[in-house]
Image (cartoon, grey):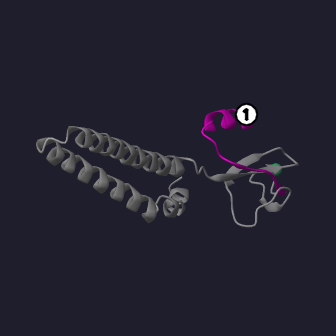
Amino acid sequence: MSKVESSTSTTARIPSFVLMIIFITLALSLTALISAVSFFTSGEEVIAGYLLLIGALGLAFSTYMLLQTRRRISSLRIEVPPVMSTIECKKCGFKNVREFQRGDYIFKEVEPCQKCTDKMLITAVYREVKEKDKEKERSSF
Ligand SMILES: [Zn+2]
């Protein structure tokens, strides 16, 4: 598992332009809030109200964006399960599951069987999902 995780670390980066948009929105809404206060103290309550609304919306938007990007990154990290290859011996039925190796394909002949030393075939190549335990149960007989 740890081997595969290290290869996915490159996808877990927030695009810099998204961060820039978030920070600009944050700065603008903070400015709107600050000027709302100054407008309020000078008696311009309608303008102050509008600025307050804009500032609040901007703050809500930027925090929402931040949360969204963070969630997307964490889901990316989880959503890359390792690719597995199922190897089967046609002679004695011995089954083995190992991590996918470059050049693996279905019906490729691989290393000899551990039991009868006959050649083994790759019978399945699949991405390992969270239902790992179910898969193990199914292939154990
Ligand atoms: Zn065998």
- Position above or below: 121 against 39: below
Q: Which residue is mark 1?
A: 138
Q: Is residue 135 left or right of residue 39?
A: right
Viewer-nearest residue: 58 or 87: 58
Element at label 1: helix
Q: Is residue 91 left or right of residue 84?
A: right
Q: Residue at x 21, y 45 (%)?
A: 36
Viewer-nearest residue: 71 or 84: 71
Quadrant of res 105: bottom right
Callout 1 crowding tier (Cα within 10 Å): few <14, some 14–19, many ≥20: few
User: Which residue is at the far bottom?
Assistant: 103
Q: Residue at x 34, y 59 (%)?
A: 24
Where is residue 112 drawn, in percent x and y?
79, 59
Q: Is residue 30 left or right of residue 103?
A: left
Where is residue 97 drawn, in percent x and y?
69, 49
Where is residue 106 drawn, in percent x and y?
83, 56
- Total numbered badges shown on the rendered structure: 1
Q: Which residues are magenta?
A: 119-141
Residue 133 part of the magenta segment: yes
Which residue type carries mark 1? Arg
Quarter placement of the C terminus: top right
Q: Is mark 1 within 8 Å of ligand 1?
A: no
Q: Is residue 23 left or right of residue 140?
A: left
Residue 13 part of the magenta segment: no
Q: Residue at x 76, y 46 (%)?
A: 95
- Position above or below: 39 against 4: above
